[in-house]
Amino acid sequence: MLNLRFAATLILCAVTALSPPTSQAAEKDRGLTVMTFNMDGGTNFGRIFLAQTFPQLVAADSLTYAEIVASNIPERATGIADQIASAEPDLVALQEVFTYSVGPFPGTATTVTADALQSLLDALEQRGQRYVVAGLLTNLDATVPALDPATGLFSVRAVEHDAVLVRRDLPVSQLKIADVQVEHFAATATFNSPLLGPIKLIRGWIAVDARKRGKNYRFVTAHLDSNSPLLAAAQARELVTGPGDTSLPLVVAGDFNSDAESANPVVNAAWRTMLEAGFVDVWSAIRPSDPGYTWPLHGEAPYTPVETPNVRIDLVFARGKIRPVDISLIAHTLSDLTPSGLWPSDHAGLAATFVLEP
């Protein structure tokens, strides 16, 4: 049986060997740095889906919202901003970008209590880093009741996005956005809640076409299904036949929920789907002897013990006339904790550097 990681490494070496020599200055001109980061919504919402009565739902919502508040999204966003400010990527892929609001019950929840995206942009601005949102995809918008023992029932609204940020301080010759596409996957999971009925767990992708030094390329981010490896593989096939159907140099980065280090072909089905479509797994090509585990850094609540990451599900792929140069884990050590001792996310992020080939 063909070793796909070994094959991916051979492909990368072959492409590098066939590439004409270039000067360091020329490579710098065509250099491209990207980052991917799952921002972590502060909870996994699992107990909400299992509620069978209204009191159970309220209790589950209340505990879940307490976890979210304790996770301190604004402070964690500053930790991610520190990583972006250090690497200064051209493009940043973000998953699990949540906004939470509260309000009366029954009624609408309009008072924002946490906005991960705005907190991140504000923190970047404070660090002299100028980024704007190039693409935004909404996957969840739900309002549920919760209980405050002092004031009674209230509504909590959760809105979840994927996003792509782009630097806005570069000249047009260095970075110009030509087109942005956003789309949900046709392959979608449905969870049958005993109380709430069928709930669709929607996921999707964002594709950004850009130009650098006269060279066009495409950057794609996605967050694949976390409950079914086979559904994640189906979504990966949609990536291949959708935004991946291009002759442009292509980078795909995101949370694939597919353990690239697993020997189980079911568990890593989405990862294998990308390799079989001609993509290079940048981590295994650049750092073949390092497992590069990205999750989990901690449990759901901030007071739970630190975990030892044991899966590599946050991935960066490349295909076409673009050469991977480096890739590294970010926000994955104790030195990366926020001033209050919080992890920026339960996922490590990835920063990758490429050279666009002539």
Image (spheres, grey):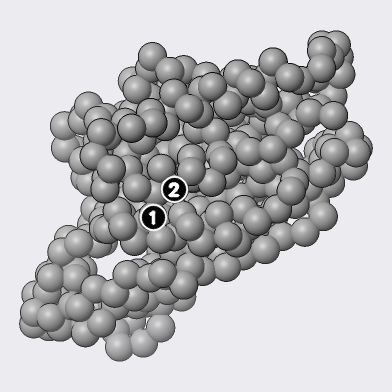
The answer to whether the residue labelled 2 contacts the one labelled 1, judged by CB atoms less than 8 Å apart, is: yes
Q: How many residues crowd mark 1 within 10 Å: few (<14), some (14–19), many (20+)?
A: many
Say which element carries label 1: helix
**Rendering coords of residue 273 (x, y %):** 44, 48
Left or right of residue 143, residue 167 in this image: right
**Rendering coords of residue 222 (x, y %):** 50, 53
Residue 233: which numbered mark, if any? 1
Q: Tell me which residue sits at (38%, 14%) in the image.
A: 289
* Quarter holding residue 169: top right
Q: Is residue 320 above or below residue 333?
A: below
Residue at image mark 2: 273
Q: Tell me which residue sits at (56%, 50%) in the image.
A: 221
Query: In terms of sequence position, does the residue under pointer 2 or pointer 1 come before the other?
Result: 1
**Rendering coords of residue 217 (x, y %):** 75, 44
Q: In the image, what residue type sits under mark 2? A: Thr
* Quarter holding residue 114: bottom left
Q: How many residues crowd mark 2 within 10 Å: few (<14), some (14–19), many (20+)?
A: some
Q: In the image, what residue type sits under mark 1? A: Ala
Q: Residue furthest front?
A: 1
Left or right of residue 262, residue 80 in this image: right
* Quarter holding residue 142: bottom left
Closer to the camera in the image, 166 or 263: 263
Q: Tell me which residue sits at (46%, 54%) in the image.
A: 236
Left or right of residue 91, residue 193 in this image: left
Q: Is residue 340 above or below residue 301?
A: above
